[in-house]
Amino acid sequence: MDNNSLYRQIPKVDDLLHFFDSQQYKRDILKFCINKILAAVREDIARGDLRHIDKHQLIEQIQQYYSKFLKGTLEKVINATGIVLHTNLGRAPLPEDILKNISDIITGYSNLEYDLKKGSRGDRYHHLSEYLEFLTGAESAVILNNNAAAVFLILNTFAKDRECIVSRGELVEIGGSFRIPEVMANSGAFLKEVGTTNKTKIFDYENAISDKTVMIMKVHKSNYVIKGFTEEPSLAEITQRAKKMGLLSYYDLGSGIMTERYYTFCGEKSVKEIVASGFDLISFSGDKLLGGAQAGIVLGKKHLIDKLKKNQLMRMLRVDKITLAVLQEILRMYVMGNERDIAAIDLLNKDSTLLEKKAEKLKKVMESKVPQSKIEVEDVITYTGGGSCPMREIRSKAIVVKAVGKNISVVENNLRRYRIPVICRVSEDKLYFDVRTIFERQFHELAEGVNWALKAS
Ligand SMILES: *Cc1c(COP(=O)(O)O)cnc(C)c1O
């Protein structure tokens, strides 16, 4: 059949509308969905991918489109990768009952930007300052949309049309096109690179200082390591040299650690230690290892933080009330010493005994729902993810399912199409479900999904 006669066979929108119950389907939404499906049909014909038109199949596609449309495209998934701070899967999961505590604030009115003492306009940025002071010893704080915004605002406020010195070993790119040299160029600051990829010495910084220099910036090597013949000055050397030369020192930390529970596998300094080493400004994410909502937390000397707040760009980069409310809860957990209640910290700290137990439990559920496959528990290696603790291997446990007689990539693809999409790892002809990031409340759903994915074509 030629394309023209195929096009003529495409049913009219009104014709298709008759097949849907007007009680069950809202007409305007239905029309929208029909048009989407028909447009796809026309494209398929043009590409030569469609040889005949089946009205019943079309109606089914429209039904599916309708229910998917109402479900929305942002949906929960099961993270079976073992990567707790998975950048593509929403980084840090929040504690389950956090919404209960903040719902009064976000569903009603709050003093977000209202000074209750004076009865006049207040400042939204100070709300978390005291908690942050308590936890880190920093003099003052301001919260922005994300850490990328923090880097941008700091450079724009203090180094616009001036020079900022960064080591060549730290000119990082973080996932999703955040590159230090480009952010710096956009902020109006001039980058002065010093040292080499593997070695930067304190005199490299010192030799680079000109009368245009205003800042030494250190950037955390969040997603890579430099191994072998390497050298960099200590934090104190950098801050002391900056002070001596009358320059600002700033550390873009990426991830903020406020608990000792990370030391065992991460070996990174806490925010408190970084503050104590004397940096004038520090910035890090509100999620990542901190375990809260995405935000950019800036700590520093009061007069510098005040200057940031006065930058016009602040209006574009300011944090909203939902994020602030979430962060207030998270920081309070740290203040109270309840950081085990923070989901990301809990998941990252699960030891092998706990993981073993969890794996055995999931294995049992899997065996009952997926009787046709051999299910095993294996030791695996995972990572924290989210640009933190790079290359630090974390031991974990996975449920391994062998897909006998099936194309493994078809099964993996099916899992992503499941009612609750499942993201897992595949190696050779086996599926790996790392139990570290699978919540117990998801065990049954996951097992049903695996069973379905093995059967579906
Ligand atoms: C993650 C990261 C950023 C960006 O933080 P976002 O919260 O994703 O905006 C910037 N700098 C470093 C060093 C990072 O690790």
Image (tube, rainbow, N blue to C red):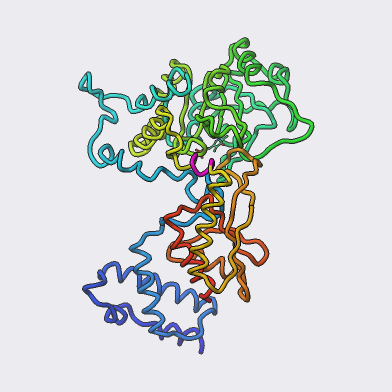
Q: Residue at x 49, y 53 (%)?
A: 438
Q: Residue at x 50, y 57 (%)?
A: 361
Q: Residue at x 49, y 71 (%)?
A: 452
Instruction: Give the residues drawn in magenta, as a range.
Output: 345-349
**Nearer to the camera, 330 or 116:** 330
Determine if residue 365 is in view: yes
Residue 232 location, quadrant: top right
Q: Residue at x 27, y 37 (%)?
A: 105
Q: Residue furthest bottom?
A: 1
From the top left corner, tell me how far across and down residue 169 is, in percent. Answer: 69, 32
From the top left corner, tell me how far across and down residue 107 is, in percent. Answer: 25, 42
Residue 203 location, quadrant: top right
Q: Residue furthest right?
A: 229
How many marks can you see?
0
**Nearer to the camera, 46 or 336:** 336
From the top left corner, tell me how far across and down residue 97 is, in percent. Answer: 35, 43
Q: Is residue 346 magenta?
A: yes
Q: Is residue 293 above or below residue 259?
A: below
Q: Is residue 44 above or below residue 82?
A: below
Residue 242 location, quadrant: top right
From the top left corner, tell me how far across and down residue 427 is, in percent. Answer: 65, 61
Query: Ligand 1 lies in which image quarter?
Result: top right
Determine if residue 186 is in view: no
Q: What is the chief secondary structure element of the magenta stretch?
A: helix
